[in-house]
Image (cartoon, rainbow, N blue to C red):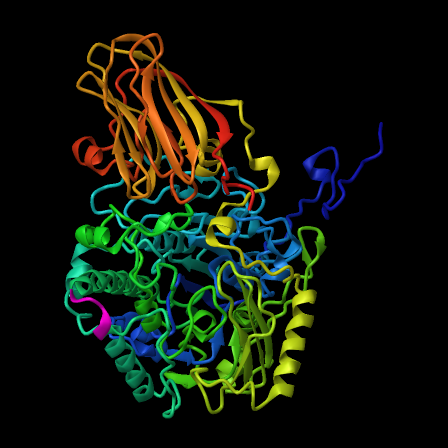
């Protein structure tokens, strides 16, 4: 008989019978006894001054209570745009060094900007899971280049046991375009009338916390709750909006002054802090035309309502922890990825996603006519930049810029069991890369030495635990910043800042210099008084930029930045792509390149019953797109050019086996024309349908209904998703040549 053989890694004994064998079980990985839960609440595009305990008039009693049980940091900094800030928080490393110097879904072809976190950069959830924690991810991810198909860069591939949320930069609050549950797109055709994303994220967070406790009573959990609030689109529930009607009639100049006064009264900023000058692009409120003020105020009312709703949900989350008996031993971090934004310009923009499509805003008069839609799911509104400056009080500058308004945000750390100076303000320098080292230090966890089979990259950040628990000096005093070619470098109380004008040649010499000890709000330029110090900081930035893969700087326009794609993702002219009914929504990243600023034809082969009705296909949503449907015996088409709408002349729709067709011609300069046709039957004359479509839509292609957010609001109000009652066999998109001079795809 053969000799007994043992299995490598099995530490028992194998014999031919159980009596001759010795059982062995691998030890279960357990967190050390008494380990705290950890909750990271990460806000989106929320300025330094937006919550009550940082000077705001917005009602945030639950967030303020976190600060009362913990600490506020008044010199915490971040990368100035979402994906990089998230990458730094999740890895403890500078964003460019982990390939995320820009938005994760825009890969310009350079190492520091490819968009996927490298596998040897161990993440926050990977580190906590290895230490025996249950790990939960909720809300916004935006750290994977490929959000179309499941892959190792998705949240469950980077350490989360469970994930529920969305993978891209923004989505509707009433009609999220593509909710992912672990690695599966949730099969949602429509949302209930009372649906709101902020509530949904919190519902799932509470459910998953309870599930974790039910499954293993002693196991601590890590919760990363990444709200998309208060990022655009500005959409809020009516009951929250009602609280803020009339609260902002005094305008942004008065609100900034009031917020700074509160910050001083709270002891958050030095008593001599100056309010930074109003941005040159922001008019004085007294100069805003009287007939535009109500429009502008409505934007800010909505923004406040959205943040109020977050606070209510933070209250629900904290109440759950308290009911579980675990609030005292739960570390809670509350912060934001970057400051308030200037993206919608001086007048704001109800149809803001025109920007991603490379289009100018519609005239403010159009927004005034549609002002009642702000806050609803009908438009993707974003506030005038004057309100962004209120959010960033007392600092100058905005999101994507490396001035104080872009890179300085609020940071609250609560741990009732361990923090002795509850309610205190910490003035030490801190950065987003410090968060992961701090949390594992507080939880008693060692950093991973190996990540996905490779030596783990070391942290750039340092633990703030001694700062939090013993008010010791900051563990480090240097940090570089870069976003969209804007640069900054901080060292020992001084910061050098260089801001660029979009689309211009990069100015490498336009630095300003600020000293925090005498100028908390970074309002006074001391570059002429200290040229040698400035030169040293500029040189330090250059060295850090090379070592972190920051170069090359990229100051192209939004059209170029948001619409570039690698060559292999640009469909050639002449090919036909076949799509089949019965599946989930085809991702916008698949469909948009087939039709963006180019000639295209869409054919639908179907069996039409005598009284058949419903949507044949829809591409896009309320932001932009097109929808074809049959109703009352006619074939219809609605074209949504990002707030510029065209209805095609309908055609009589015969019963039987048919092929219906949309032919579109892109004429150049974003102009186009289209016609409806039925093969072997009637056809319309071409009629203008402009502007041409491009990026900016949240949703992709639906076949046989218009899921979630509608392309045509009026059709949605009449019919909802309006599923087709006949049979669709296939849909073909044939891509033709690009429009003359098109900028789509090439960068």
The one nearer the camera, 720 or 36, is 720
What is the x, y in percent for residue 412? 41, 74
Q: Does residue 136 show up magenta in the picture?
A: no
> Which range is magenta?
286-290
Figure label count: 0
At x 38%, y 58%, the residue is: 227
Instruction: Please indicate, yes or no, whether residue 44 appears anywhere in the rendered image.
Output: yes
What is the x, y in percent for residue 398? 42, 68
What is the x, y in percent for residue 517? 49, 90
* On-image quarter of the N terminus: top right
Residue 661 relative to residue 492: left or right: left
At x 41%, y 45%, the residue is: 357
Dominant secondary structure of the residues highlighted in magenta in the image: helix
Image quadrant in which you'd find residue 390 = bottom left
Image quadrant in which you'd find residue 397 = bottom left
Residue 372 relative to residue 586: left or right: left
Instruction: Please indicate, yes or no, whether residue 50 appears anywhere in the rendered image.
Output: no
The one nearer the camera, 675 or 64, is 675
What is the x, y in percent for residue 236? 24, 55
Tell me: residue 467, above or below residue 319. below
The one nearer the camera, 666 or 711, is 666
């Amino acid at each position: 008989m053969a000799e007994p053989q043992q299995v490598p890694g099995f530490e028992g004994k194998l014999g031919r019978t159980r009596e001759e064998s010795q059982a062995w079980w691998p030890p279960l990985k357990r967190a050390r006894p008494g380990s705290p839960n950890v909750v990271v609440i990460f806000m989106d595009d929320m300025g330094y001054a937006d919550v009550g305990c940082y000077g705001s008039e917005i009602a945030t009693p639950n967030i303020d209570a976190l600060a009362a049980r913990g600490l506020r940091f008044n010199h915490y900094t971040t990368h100035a745009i979402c994906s990089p800030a998230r990458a730094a928080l999740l890895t403890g490393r500078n964003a460019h060094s982990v390939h995320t110097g820009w938005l994760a879904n825009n890969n310009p072809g350079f190492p520091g900007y490819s968009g996927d976190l490298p596998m040897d950069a161990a993440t926050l959830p990977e580190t906590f899971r290895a230490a025996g924690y249950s790990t939960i991810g909720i809300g916004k991810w935006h750290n994977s280049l490929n959000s179309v198909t499941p892959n190792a860069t998705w949240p469950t591939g980077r350490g989360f046991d469970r994930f529920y949320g969305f993978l891209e930069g923004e989505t509707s609050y009433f009609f999220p375009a593509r909710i992912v549950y672990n690695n599966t797109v949730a099969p949602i055709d429509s949302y209930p009338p009372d649906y709101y994303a902020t509530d949904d994220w919190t519902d799932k967070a509470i459910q998953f916390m309870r599930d974790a406790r039910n499954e293993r009573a002693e196991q601590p959990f890590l919760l990363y709750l990444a709200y998309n609030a208060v990022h655009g689109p500005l959409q809020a529930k009516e009951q929250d909006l009602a609280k803020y009607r009339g609260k902002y009639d005094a305008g942004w100049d008065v609100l900034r002054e009031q917020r700074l006064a509160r910050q001083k009264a709270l002891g958050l900023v030095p008593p001599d802090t100056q309010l930074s000058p109003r941005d040159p692009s922001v008019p004085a409120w007294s100069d805003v035309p009287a007939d535009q003020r109500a429009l502008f105020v409505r934007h800010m009312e909505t923004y406040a309502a959205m943040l109020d709703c977050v606070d209510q949900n933070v209250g629900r989350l904290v109440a759950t922890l308290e009911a579980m008996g675990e609030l005292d031993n739960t570390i809670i971090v509350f912060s934001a990825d970057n400051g308030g934004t200037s993206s919608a310009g001086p007048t704001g923009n109800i149809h803001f996603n025109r920007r991603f499509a490379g289009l100018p805003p519609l005239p403010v008069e159009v927004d005034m006519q549609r002002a009642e839609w702000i806050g609803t799911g009908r438009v993707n509104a974003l506030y005038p930049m004057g309100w962004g400056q209120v959010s960033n009080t007392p600092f100058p500058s905005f999101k994507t810029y490396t001035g104080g308004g872009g890179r300085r945000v609020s940071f609250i750390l609560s741990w009732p069991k361990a923090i002795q100076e509850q309610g205190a303000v910490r003035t030490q320098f801190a950065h987003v890369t410090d968060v992961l080292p701090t949390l594992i230090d507080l939880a008693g966890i060692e950093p991973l030495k190996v990540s996905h089979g490779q030596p783990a990259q070391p942290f750039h950040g340092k633990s703030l635990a001694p700062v939090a628990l013993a008010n010791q000096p900051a563990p480090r005093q240097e940090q570089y910043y870069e976003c969209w070619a804007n640069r900054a470098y901080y060292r020992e109380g001084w910061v050098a800042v260089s801001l660029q004008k979009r689309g211009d040649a990069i100015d490498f010499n336009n630095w300003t210099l600020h000293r925090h000890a005498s100028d908390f709000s970074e309002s006074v330029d001391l570059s002429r008084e200290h040229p040698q110090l400035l030169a040293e900081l500029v040189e330090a930035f250059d060295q850090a930029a090379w070592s972190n893969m920051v170069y090359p700087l990229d100051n192209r326009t939004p059209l170029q930045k948001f619409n570039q794609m690698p060559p292999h993702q640009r469909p050639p002219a002449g090919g036909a792509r076949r799509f089949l009914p019965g599946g989930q929504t085809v991702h916008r990243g698949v469909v948009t390149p087939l039709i963006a600023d180019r000639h295209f034809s869409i054919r639908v082969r179907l069996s039409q019953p005598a009284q058949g009705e419903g949507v044949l296909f829809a591409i896009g949503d309320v932001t932009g797109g097109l929808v074809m449907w049959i109703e009352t015996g006619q074939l219809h088409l609605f074209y949504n050019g990002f707030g510029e709408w065209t209805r095609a002349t309908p055609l009589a729709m015969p019963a039987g086996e048919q092929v219906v067709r949309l032919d579109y011609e892109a004429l150049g300069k974003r102009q186009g024309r289209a016609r409806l046709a039925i093969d072997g039957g009637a056809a319309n004359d071409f009629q203008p349908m402009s502007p041409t479509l491009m990026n900016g839509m949240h949703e992709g292609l639906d076949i046989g209904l218009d899921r979630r957010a509608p392309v045509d609001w009026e059709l949605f109000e009449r019919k909802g998703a309006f599923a087709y009652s006949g049979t669709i066999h296939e849909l073909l998109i044939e891509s033709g040549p690009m429009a003359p001079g098109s900028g789509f795809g090439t960068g």
